[in-house]
Image (cartoon, rainbow, N blue to C red):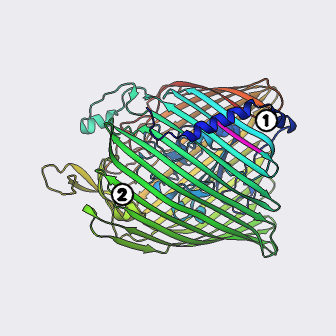
Amino acid sequence: MQNPHTAPVPKRILIAIAMAFGSPLATQAVQAEEQIELPTIAVTANPLGVASDELVVPVSTLSGRELSLQRESTLGETLKSIPGISSTYFGPNASRPVIHGLDGERVRMMQNGVGILDASSLSFDHAVALDPLVIEQIDVVRGPAALLYGGSAVGGVVNAIDHRIPKEAIDGVTGRSEIRFGGAENQKNGAIVLDAGNGVLTVHADAYKRKTDDLDIPGYAVSRRKNEADGEARENKGRLVNSGSDADGGAIGASIALENGYVGMSYSTFNNKYGTVADPDVLIDMKSDRWDFASELRDLGSIINKVKVRMAHTDYEHRELEDGEVGTTFKNRGLEGSIEASHGNIGPLSGVIGLQFHNSRFEALGEEAFVPPNRTNTRALYVYEELPLDALKLTFGGRVEHAKIESSGGGDFGPSQSRSFTPYSLATGALFNLNEQWSLAANLSHNERAPSYFELYADGEHVATGQYEVGSTDLQKERSNGIDAQLRWKQNHDSFSIGAYYTRFSNFIGLFNSGILVNEEGEAGEVDSDIPEARFTGAKAVFKGLEAEGKFRVYDKVGALDLKLRGDYVRATNRDTGDSLPRISPLKLGFGLDYRFNRFGSRLDVLRAFKQNRTDDNELATDGYTLVNATLTYKLPTPSYFQLEAFAKAYNLLDQTIRDHTSLLKDIAPMGGRSLLVGLRGEF
């Protein structure tokens, strides 16, 4: 597929980087520096920037080689190796993370600490406007204690960090590149990232290209259960029709090192044209342009010792093409940012106070527009304090927000409307070090979220979900109270953690089937009334679960062999009816063996997902499966300043039909079958 939005910017970046790689000056600069490494610490979970083992909230970080081995075509699939996380899988091109059973507006998607402005929370067939190929690090903060990042963070925060605005000055040239071929979707991907500086000015450039074919699947796309339930034919054996993609993008950024900080800007573009899977005749043609600004000033004084500013302006648009003609166009334009100040220590007490703002305008134009044009404006003030007391660390966070969501109305949507909300959230936590190896962490929180524009104003057929969705302007704030606790152990190469969480919603805003059939105009009782109606309403709900992971060195005589264990379980119940909530991940248990010797590396990962038969009235049960993946790596002999590693990854070795229960399309879009992917990555 050719992308009409393909811009010349990525091509110019590729040429510039290729020239830099071939330049003798660039090579001399690299030789002058033994090794330059960009920082990859977990910065999202704590605004004070402490080490990961000192964090009170549950946090996971993927970076470096581990991120490269786990990298998939979407953020949701990339993060599925982390306990407690699944994905909304809408085919291989659109997938958002699901954390503790919560998705959509309850998982805050961020890029370098600023929200990603797109349309992915409106509909699961809309991809997140960011490609994992250029991400350097992903931080995942799980649980209600992530409230500092917004009311939509009750499920957690996913922050993708790309260093497009360099925070640290470098003197020389550093970079990485990666190519990969194969897999169930026959992907042909490549990315290149370059940073160069003179100790004061640091320039960043990156570019990527991704092209895939239709996904190879074992068996039929349509499940046996769906065929028996509604008679849908079991066609397209071995291939998921309309699941190919053609994407590219890139960025240019720069920063200036100041005596006590930095200031910088970047421009990035994202283009993606892909099939929607749910409809074989529909393609989504997506484009997002983003400008970022970031600055940090340190050592300012005893009262305010650090100030951090982050802002991003996004111009997002995607067109849904039906048989080559534009059917519906979605646009989202806006500005989001934060200003954060760290105060000087008051005795042992340290903390930050911040101001966050978001202004966006969303439009859906065309025959499948089921929400009116609207504006969302939010302002929030938050505070985070930390008090270490010998073996005990106490934390406190609070947030108050004002949100105004305005509908322009028009057409079938009626007159203009406006709703305002003032959510507030509080959280407190404690980390107690029992000894050098053992620690216990716990968090309590109260969280409130303003309804989103589509929860308030939706009124129309949503083809991607196969429902007629109706919002409610009478919705109140979503409210919940949560608790989570973790027991952690770490000694040398070994570590283990087990956690439990419980989140109780007094008002959970969900999309619930009304039991009524309507036509395309929303009318019931007509001859053509065959579309299920679903309404956004509030309900009482409970989410509770367990998650655990461990890593143990089991052999280190010749090479090193590590055993990895993982498991997670979540149960979500509608307290009003006693029924299970839809699309909740089943119990999952897994183990992995990771062996490294000299230049060789190998890994075997086995995950068992059990049958999910706790369903609501409008979804089918899902069979269990066993997913087996294997990876081989080899570091090629190279000069000391350059590292080159070849890798091969075999997916789904048992060739099982895998249907992820958290996917809206699980009964028509299984995961890929047995396949082999090979690649080469380099760093200098």
- Residue 367 is left or right of residue 635, and the answer is left
Graded by Cα atoms within 10 Å as few (under 14), some (14 to 19) or many (20 or more), the crowding at tag 1 reads some
| Location of mark 2 (residue) | 511
Which badge, 2 or 1, is on the more N-terminal residue? Answer: 1
| Location of mark 1 (residue) | 26
**Frontmost residue, 78 versus 181:** 181
Residue flagged by tag 1: what amino acid is it? Ala
Would you say the residues marked 2 and 1 are in contact, meaning their CB atoms lie under 8 Å apart?
Answer: no
- The image quarter in which residue 193 lies: top right
- Residue 37 is left or right of residue 134, and the answer is right
Residue 194 is inside the magenta segment: yes
> Which quadrant: the C terminus?
top right
Residue 461 in picture, x, y percent from top left: 28, 52
Residue 271 visible to the viewer: yes
Task: State which region is magenta.
Answer: 192-196
- Residue 289 is left or right of residue 205, and the answer is left
What is the count of numbered marks? Answer: 2
- Residue at point 20% right, 48% down? 530
Name above or below for residue 500 compared with residue 495: below
Which of label 2 and label 1 is nearer to you?
Answer: 1
- Residue at point 50% right, 65% down? 359
Under circle 2, the secondary element is strand
Whole-number angstrom distance, CA of label 2 to CA of label 1:
55 Å
